[in-house]
Amino acid sequence: MKKILFLLFIFLFKSTFANDVTSDYLSLKTTFPITEEKFKNYKILIVPGVLAESFISKSNNFIKLRSLFAEGFKDQIEYLKNNESDFEFVRLETETPPEENALKIIESLEKSTLPVLIYSHSKGGLDTLEAFRLRPDLIQKVHGWITVQTPFYGAPIASKVHRNHLYKGGAKNLFRIMGGNQKGLSSLTIEERLQIMQQSSTIELIEKIAKETRFINMATIKENTRGYDTPLELFRNYSDKKAGPNDGVVPLKSALLSEHGFNVDYVIEENVDHLMTMTNFYILRQPYDREAHTAAALKLLLK
C-alpha cells in the first residue's frame, strides 16, 4: 500500500511541471508572416507515420489514396522550401516496426552538422523514440522535438485488430503489401507499447529528452457530431468508448506523456482528426491550415 501511495505521489508531483502551451501554439498559428529566419540555424527532420506513403504520389507503395486525399505532407514540405529551410523528409517504410525505421532516423541525425528540430507524426514519434533508445548519445544533437498525434501508449483500434483473428489476417496482408510486416502492426498495440513505456530505461530516456531538449507533445481531438464528420468515424467512436477523447486513432492519454507523470509540455487542438494534420480529405472538405500548423509547431520549439 505504501509503495502504491508513493508512486501516486511521484506521478502527481511530476505531472505538475508539464505546461499546457496550447494558447502559445494557437497564437503562433495566427501570427503573420509565418516565415522564420531562425530556422536557418537548424536542420529540420520531418518523420512520417504509419500508412503515410499511401498519401504520397512518389512513394513505392502499392496502395495509393490520391483520389480521395490530397498529397501527404505537401504543405509541410512547401512551407519549409518557401522558408528556405534546411530540412529532410525522412523516407521510411512506415509499416515496418520502430526498430527498423529507427536506423534511418539515426542516420539522418548523424549526418546533421546543425542542431536538429524534429517534427514527427503519429508512428513517426515511436520510430524517433526508438532511435533515441538505440542511440541516446544523439539526443545532444537535438534542440527540439514535437510529436504530433503519437500513440506512445498504443491505439485501441490497433489492439482490437491484433486480437481479432479475422481482422489480424487482413491487416497483416495490408501491411505486407505496403512494404511492412505484422510487427509493424503490433508495435501500435496498447499491450506492446505498455511493455516498452513501463521499462525503467524508457522512463529514464524520456526524462533525459525532456531535460536536455525542448520536448512537446501535440494531441488533437475530433469530437463526435451528428452525421459523418470524419473519414475515421468508426475508429473514432470505438476509441472514444475504450479510451475517451481521441483524434480518430490516438487517445489523448496515449499521445500526452504528461498524462503519465512526465514533465513534457503539450498542445491539445480541438476539432482536428488524425489525418488533417498531414492531408485533406476531398469528400468532407475539412478546412485546416497545415502550413500555419507546421510553422507554429516548429516555432514553438524555439520559444
Image (cartoon, rainbow, N blue to C red):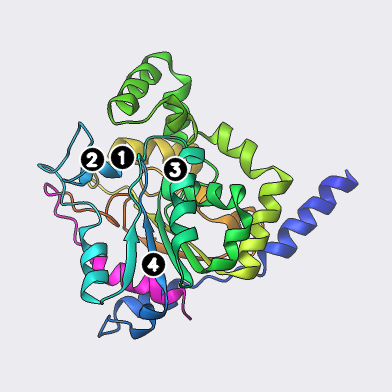
Please state the extent of the stretch shown in magenta in the rendering: 282-303
Residue of label 3: 101
Looking at marks 3 and 2 on the same chain, the residue that comes earlier in the sequence is marked by: 2
In-front residue for pair 285/79: 79
Residue 72 horizontal/vertical position (percent): 23, 52
Q: In the picture, residue 86 is in which quadrant?
A: bottom left
Residue drawn at 9 percent across, 42 percent down: 67
Left or right: 26, with 227 as reference point:
right
Kindly check if marks 4 and 1 are in contact, taking CB atoms under 8 A apart as contact. Answer: no
Residue of label 2: 54
- Mark 3–mark 2 Cα distance, whole angstroms, equals 17 Å
Q: SS for tag 1?
A: loop
Residue 51 - label: 1
Identity of the amino acid at label 4?
Answer: Ile
- Mark 4–mark 3 Cα distance, whole angstroms, equals 17 Å
Residue 181 horizontal/vertical position (percent): 40, 26
Residue drawn at 37 percent across, 20 percent down: 167
Kindly check if marks 1 and 2 are in contact, taking CB atoms under 8 A apart as contact. Answer: yes
Residue 3 horizontal/vertical position (percent): 87, 46
In-front residue for pair 273/240: 273
Kindly check if marks 2 and 4 are in contact, taking CB atoms under 8 A apart as contact. Answer: no
Identity of the amino acid at label 2?
Answer: Ser
- Mark 2–mark 4 Cα distance, whole angstroms, equals 23 Å
- Mark 3–mark 1 Cα distance, whole angstroms, equals 13 Å
Q: Which of marks 3 and 1 is in front?
A: 3
Looking at marks 4 and 1 on the same chain, the residue that comes earlier in the sequence is marked by: 4
User: Circle 2: is it few (<14), some (14-19), or many (20+) Cα within 10 Å?
Assistant: many
- Mark 4–mark 1 Cα distance, whole angstroms, equals 22 Å
User: Circle 4: is it few (<14), some (14-19), or many (20+) Cα within 10 Å?
Assistant: many
